[in-house]
Image (cartoon, rainbow, N blue to C red):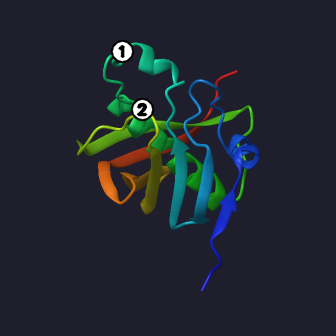
Amino acid sequence: MSIAKTMDINEVIKYLPHRYPFLLIDRVLSYEPGNQICALKNVTINEPFFTGHFPKHPVMPGVLVIEAMAQAAAILSFVTVGGEIDENSIVYFVGIDNARFKRPVTPGDALQLKVSLTRRIRGIWKFQAAAYVDDFLVAEAELMCTARDIPA
Protein backbone atom coordinates (compact mmCIF):
# COMPACT_ATOMS: atom_id res chain seq x y z
CA MET A 1 0.00 0.00 0.00
CA SER A 2 1.45 3.37 -1.02
CA ILE A 3 1.40 6.38 1.25
CA ALA A 4 -0.65 9.32 -0.08
CA LYS A 5 1.45 12.41 -0.65
CA THR A 6 0.40 16.06 -0.18
CA MET A 7 1.54 19.46 -1.54
CA ASP A 8 1.31 22.96 -0.16
CA ILE A 9 0.94 26.01 -2.41
CA ASN A 10 4.73 26.37 -2.78
CA GLU A 11 4.93 22.89 -4.27
CA VAL A 12 1.80 23.39 -6.40
CA ILE A 13 3.35 26.35 -8.23
CA LYS A 14 6.34 24.20 -9.17
CA TYR A 15 3.98 22.05 -11.27
CA LEU A 16 1.64 24.70 -12.73
CA PRO A 17 2.50 27.73 -14.87
CA HIS A 18 -0.70 29.49 -13.73
CA ARG A 19 -0.57 32.45 -11.36
CA TYR A 20 -3.15 34.79 -9.82
CA PRO A 21 -5.90 35.21 -10.82
CA PHE A 22 -5.87 31.96 -12.79
CA LEU A 23 -4.21 29.57 -10.36
CA LEU A 24 -7.16 27.48 -9.14
CA ILE A 25 -5.41 24.97 -6.86
CA ASP A 26 -4.60 26.01 -3.28
CA ARG A 27 -3.37 22.67 -1.99
CA VAL A 28 -3.09 19.01 -2.92
CA LEU A 29 -4.65 16.85 -0.23
CA SER A 30 -3.34 13.56 -1.64
CA TYR A 31 -1.94 12.03 -4.80
CA GLU A 32 -0.65 8.76 -6.13
CA PRO A 33 1.44 9.10 -9.32
CA GLY A 34 -0.12 7.23 -12.22
CA ASN A 35 -3.42 6.89 -10.40
CA GLN A 36 -5.25 9.78 -8.74
CA ILE A 37 -5.11 13.22 -7.11
CA CYS A 38 -7.35 15.11 -4.70
CA ALA A 39 -6.82 18.89 -4.66
CA LEU A 40 -8.49 21.85 -2.96
CA LYS A 41 -9.65 25.26 -4.19
CA ASN A 42 -10.94 27.55 -1.45
CA VAL A 43 -13.53 29.78 -3.11
CA THR A 44 -13.73 33.30 -1.65
CA ILE A 45 -15.78 36.39 -2.42
CA ASN A 46 -12.48 38.07 -3.40
CA GLU A 47 -12.27 36.04 -6.62
CA PRO A 48 -12.16 38.53 -9.52
CA PHE A 49 -14.89 36.74 -11.52
CA PHE A 50 -17.52 37.30 -8.80
CA THR A 51 -17.79 41.02 -9.61
CA GLY A 52 -19.47 40.12 -12.88
CA HIS A 53 -20.76 36.56 -12.32
CA PHE A 54 -23.14 37.50 -10.77
CA PRO A 55 -23.10 40.67 -8.60
CA LYS A 56 -26.31 39.87 -6.68
CA HIS A 57 -25.87 36.09 -6.63
CA PRO A 58 -22.17 35.15 -6.97
CA VAL A 59 -21.58 31.82 -8.73
CA MET A 60 -18.21 30.37 -9.80
CA PRO A 61 -18.33 29.95 -13.59
CA GLY A 62 -18.61 26.31 -14.62
CA VAL A 63 -15.73 26.67 -17.06
CA LEU A 64 -13.49 27.61 -14.12
CA VAL A 65 -14.62 24.55 -12.18
CA ILE A 66 -13.56 22.50 -15.23
CA GLU A 67 -10.30 24.46 -15.39
CA ALA A 68 -9.61 23.69 -11.72
CA MET A 69 -10.10 19.98 -12.43
CA ALA A 70 -7.75 20.30 -15.42
CA GLN A 71 -5.08 21.97 -13.28
CA ALA A 72 -5.31 19.05 -10.84
CA ALA A 73 -4.97 16.67 -13.82
CA ALA A 74 -1.88 18.59 -14.99
CA ILE A 75 -0.23 18.17 -11.59
CA LEU A 76 -1.04 14.45 -11.69
CA SER A 77 0.53 14.24 -15.16
CA PHE A 78 3.77 15.86 -14.03
CA VAL A 79 4.12 13.79 -10.84
CA THR A 80 3.40 10.65 -12.87
CA VAL A 81 6.28 11.31 -15.28
CA GLY A 82 8.48 12.48 -12.41
CA GLY A 83 9.09 16.05 -13.45
CA GLU A 84 8.20 19.61 -12.65
CA ILE A 85 7.08 22.06 -15.30
CA ASP A 86 9.79 24.05 -17.01
CA GLU A 87 9.57 27.13 -19.16
CA ASN A 88 9.70 25.03 -22.33
CA SER A 89 6.64 22.78 -21.85
CA ILE A 90 2.96 23.09 -21.04
CA VAL A 91 -0.07 20.83 -20.67
CA TYR A 92 -2.95 21.63 -23.06
CA PHE A 93 -6.56 20.53 -23.12
CA VAL A 94 -7.38 18.40 -26.16
CA GLY A 95 -10.90 17.39 -25.16
CA ILE A 96 -13.66 17.69 -22.61
CA ASP A 97 -16.45 15.10 -22.73
CA ASN A 98 -19.58 14.51 -20.71
CA ALA A 99 -19.26 17.68 -18.63
CA ARG A 100 -22.15 18.00 -16.18
CA PHE A 101 -22.88 20.64 -13.58
CA LYS A 102 -24.99 19.52 -10.63
CA ARG A 103 -25.14 22.59 -8.37
CA PRO A 104 -23.58 26.06 -8.11
CA VAL A 105 -20.26 26.78 -6.40
CA THR A 106 -20.43 29.94 -4.29
CA PRO A 107 -18.15 32.02 -2.05
CA GLY A 108 -17.16 30.15 1.10
CA ASP A 109 -17.17 26.75 -0.60
CA ALA A 110 -14.17 24.44 -0.35
CA LEU A 111 -14.05 22.90 -3.82
CA GLN A 112 -12.52 19.43 -3.65
CA LEU A 113 -11.20 18.18 -6.99
CA LYS A 114 -10.86 14.43 -7.49
CA VAL A 115 -9.14 13.32 -10.68
CA SER A 116 -8.18 9.79 -11.77
CA LEU A 117 -5.96 8.84 -14.68
CA THR A 118 -7.91 6.42 -16.85
CA ARG A 119 -5.68 6.08 -19.91
CA ARG A 120 -2.41 7.27 -21.42
CA ILE A 121 -1.82 6.50 -25.10
CA ARG A 122 0.60 8.18 -27.55
CA GLY A 123 0.97 11.35 -25.50
CA ILE A 124 -2.76 11.79 -24.82
CA TRP A 125 -3.80 11.54 -21.19
CA LYS A 126 -7.43 10.82 -20.30
CA PHE A 127 -8.86 11.58 -16.86
CA GLN A 128 -12.13 11.14 -15.01
CA ALA A 129 -12.67 14.28 -12.94
CA ALA A 130 -15.21 15.31 -10.34
CA ALA A 131 -15.64 18.36 -8.10
CA TYR A 132 -17.32 18.25 -4.71
CA VAL A 133 -18.43 20.74 -2.08
CA ASP A 134 -18.76 18.96 1.23
CA ASP A 135 -19.93 15.54 0.07
CA PHE A 136 -22.07 16.85 -2.80
CA LEU A 137 -21.03 16.34 -6.42
CA VAL A 138 -21.08 19.76 -8.11
CA ALA A 139 -19.47 18.93 -11.48
CA GLU A 140 -17.90 16.08 -13.42
CA ALA A 141 -16.21 15.58 -16.77
CA GLU A 142 -13.84 13.43 -18.78
CA LEU A 143 -10.72 15.43 -19.62
CA MET A 144 -8.07 14.79 -22.26
CA CYS A 145 -4.72 16.57 -22.16
CA THR A 146 -1.33 16.46 -23.79
CA ALA A 147 2.06 17.97 -22.95
CA ARG A 148 3.75 20.02 -25.61
CA ASP A 149 6.90 22.05 -25.96
CA ILE A 150 6.30 25.80 -26.14
CA PRO A 151 7.41 27.20 -29.52
CA ALA A 152 10.51 29.38 -29.30
102 vs 62: above or below: below
List the residue tagged with mark 1.
55
Q: Check the image and name the residue furthest to the bottom.
A: 1
Which residue is located at x 65 percent, y 77 percent?
3
In which image quadrant can residue 102 be found?
top left
Query: Residue 67, percent across and down?
Result: 45, 36
Please rate how many residues cluster around mark 1, counting C-alpha atoms within 10 Å: few if below 14, some from 14 to 19, many from 20: few
Nearer to the camera, 68 or 142? 68
List the residue tagged with mark 2.
64
135 vs 147: above or below: below
39 vs 91: above or below: below
76 vs 12: above or below: below
Please rate how many residues cluster around mark 2, counting C-alpha atoms within 10 Å: few if below 14, some from 14 to 19, many from 20: few
Nearer to the camera, 13 or 105? 105
Which element is circle 2 on? helix
Q: Distance between the residues labelled 1 and 2?
A: 17 Å
Is 98 on the left or on the right of 107, as rendered? left
Which residue is located at x 60 percent, y 86 percent?
1
Q: Which amino acid does label 2 sit on?
A: Leu
